Image (cartoon, rainbow, N blue to C red):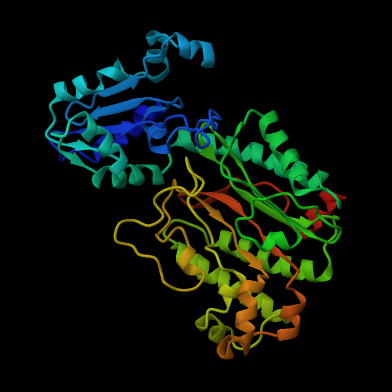
Amino acid sequence: MSNQLHRSKLLSLFEDSEEGIIYLKGAELMYRYATDYEFPFRQESNFWYLTGVNEPGYHAILDIKSGEYHLFTPKRDSQFAVWHGRIKPMEEIQDLYEPDHLHYDNQLLSVLNELDSDKIYCLDEEQAEYLEDLNRDFNLEIDTLVDAITYCRCIKTDYELDLMRRAAEVNNIAHREVMKSVKPGMYEHEAKAIFDYHQEKHGLLQPAYTGIHAGGVNSAILHYVENNQKIKDGDLYLIDAGFEYEGYASDFTRTYPINGKFSSDQAKIYQVVLEALNKSIDKTEPGVKMEELHLNACRIILGGLKDIGVVKGDLEEMMDNDIFALFFPHGLGHFLGLDTHDVGGYPKGVERIERPGIKYLRVRRELIPGMVITIEPGIYFIPALLKPALEDEEKSKFLNKEKVKSLFDFGGIRIEDNLIITEDGYENLTDVPKEIGDIEDMMR
């Protein structure tokens, strides 16, 4: 029923179209280069959103005028059963996905011809080319559909939010178990194994994204994925990871000392990031713009870094000179849903702000109830950014050179929570310790 609601939401946006059909092609199995190594299958998100089908080889059609839903299933032969297992009978597929009309995939062209539509809305060029190969006389349109589905997916239904709560519930468990288990001398991939075990133990089998499990200086690499280094006593450990439930993602980040006790510098810098997180969350409500939250977090970060002697000078001058981007080079957050970096962050006509740091913000719009976002400020000491700044006449006057240099091997700190935007504020899905005392207590 949830996918029927999604289809109804989408079709309501085409009410002014007297005729036309919507076509979507599901994902195929993918293989590593020219081998028979199969990557784990995961359905294309828009197709999953509208059909609920998480199997390869399917197609779907929505008839705009009648509202009828056609689903096309692959016609499997005995060899499929030999290599891949039981073939679902048509009656079972009908019960599972409840289309108005169920067909085999070799009937796709005949059904398209029978519907004889004046226009076929496709998701992208690749899907349009697939239909062109079937019949070059089709009138195909590729701009409208992606905008319409994006609009629908931005605002989650109650059913979707429940799936995201379940993904978050398990993510909370897995993050806590890693926090309790990590210790000096452990490899990053060992910590990752603990995390993955607790996700899969609770039935979540698909990572929502390539998780980051980073110790020491690796914690300053924003998308670190090697996860193969030993974490030394005194290092920070940053874990940014989550699995998905029924396709819906969870995405938390926590950073803490591998030995369970923050050093003086670690505690001071961590507290600045935590303040940026908590104050950003406190300001999150319907109507607020993400760029406002981002710039407010930048001010908090610069103010905190000034208090502990990393930067110096007038706060507004530092903001005007984008000094925050030397330490906080990414955006404050992004949409979350069927994709970890979910669709809809930039509505049509809204452009990125070409400014260091904020140009990587993945959402630039007012928040609306039903949206799900991440809030994830950070402070990183990245020599590739800081060394040129120390040599720059304008930027260097805001930097305490010796203090900055002493932190080149510090790594980075990021803290990330997931929020549902509600009518009067937010619901925080993340329940993993983030206060210094609570972290040290759990690790102890």
Judge by depth and name the residue closer to the eye, 38 or 204: 38
For the N terminus, the image quarter is: top left
Q: Residue at x 52, y 66 (%)?
A: 294
Residue furthest to the front: 34
How far across and how far down the image is residue 117, in percent? 14, 30
The quarter holding residue 299 reads bottom right
Query: Relative to 434, is 398 on the left or the right?
Result: left
How many numbered tags mark residues here? 0
Query: Relative to 133, is 154 on the left or the right?
Result: right
How far across and how far down the image is residue 273, in percent? 66, 65
Residue 306 lies, with reference to residue 360, above or below; the image says below
How far across and how far down the image is residue 384, in percent? 62, 72
Judge by depth and name the residue closer to the eye, 107 or 96: 107
Residue 142 lies, with reference to residue 261, above or below; the image says above
The quarter holding residue 409 reads bottom right
Does any portion of residue 142 appear in the rendered image?
A: yes
Q: Residue at x 64, y 28 (%)?
A: 203
Does any portion of residue 86 appear in the rendered image?
A: no
Q: Residue at x 15, y 40 (%)?
A: 16
Residue 224 lies, with reference to residue 130, above or below; the image says below
